[in-house]
Image (tube, helix red, strand yellow):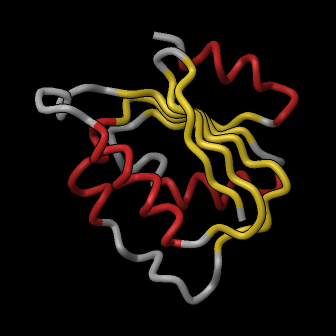
């Protein structure tokens, strides 16, 4: 599995590949919060998730742990997910689309430029 985070201007880009582990998600989420300076706690960020060669979520990991979303979920204004259409329902369920304040939209890989445009402040 590969999971990396980079900054592209005002957008955080998360790239996923292979089988996703809970520990990797935690490292990304809590690591990004730890990088914030005092006073940034109320800042809103836009996130672009790009899943390439994605194989799903590792079974047996504690995916019911929602502490990060409960504490910091409001800091994400918009999230665009770019992945193969076969993963759409699962990604939207995994991210809690429709059950949190974050606007979440799914895009197929051929619409990556549209996803980036949708995230622009």
> Which residue is outermost to the bottom?
60
Residue at 51% in and 72% down: 22
Q: In this view, does 39 lie above or below 89?
A: above
Quadrant placement of the N terminus: bottom right
Position of residue 8 in the picture relative to residue 90 (left or right): left
Q: In which quarter of the image is residue 91?
A: bottom right
Q: In which quarter of the image is residue 106?
A: top right
Position of residue 82 in the picture relative to residue 67 (left or right): right
Position of residue 34 in the picture relative to residue 85 (left or right): left
Task: From the top left corner, tell me how far across and down residue 103 is, in percent.
Answer: 45, 33
Task: From the top left corner, tell me how far across and down residue 120 is, in percent.
Answer: 53, 12
Task: From the top left corner, tell me how far across and down residue 32 is, in percent.
Answer: 37, 44
Q: Which of 57 and 96 is in front in this view?
A: 57
Residue at 53% in and 65% down: 24
Q: Is residue 7 above or below residue 73?
A: above
Residue at 38% in and 28% down: 45
Quadrant placement of the C terminus: top left
The image shows a total of numbered marks equal to 0
Residue at 80% in and 25% down: 111
Q: Is residue 20 above or below residue 4?
A: below
> Which residue is outermost to the left?
39
Q: In this view, does 61 lie above or below 70?
A: below
Position of residue 89 in the picture relative to residue 7 (left or right): right
Task: From the top left corner, tell me how far across and down residue 48 is, in percent.
Answer: 59, 33
């Amino acid at each position: 599995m590969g999971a990396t985070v980079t900054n592209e201007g005002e957008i955080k880009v998360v790239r996923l590949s292979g089988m996703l582990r809970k520990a990797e998600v935690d490292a990304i989420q809590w690591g990004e919060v730890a990088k914030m300076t005092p006073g940034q706690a109320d800042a809103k960020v836009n996130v672009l998730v790009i899943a390439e060669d994605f194989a799903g979520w590792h079974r047996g990991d504690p995916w019911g742990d929602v502490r990060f979303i409960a504490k910091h979920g409001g800091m994400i204004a918009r999230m665009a997910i770019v992945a193969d259409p076969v993963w759409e329902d699962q990604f939207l369920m995994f991210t809690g689309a429709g059950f949190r304040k974050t606007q979440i939209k799914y895009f197929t890989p051929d619409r990556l430029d549209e996803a980036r445009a949708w995230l622009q402040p």
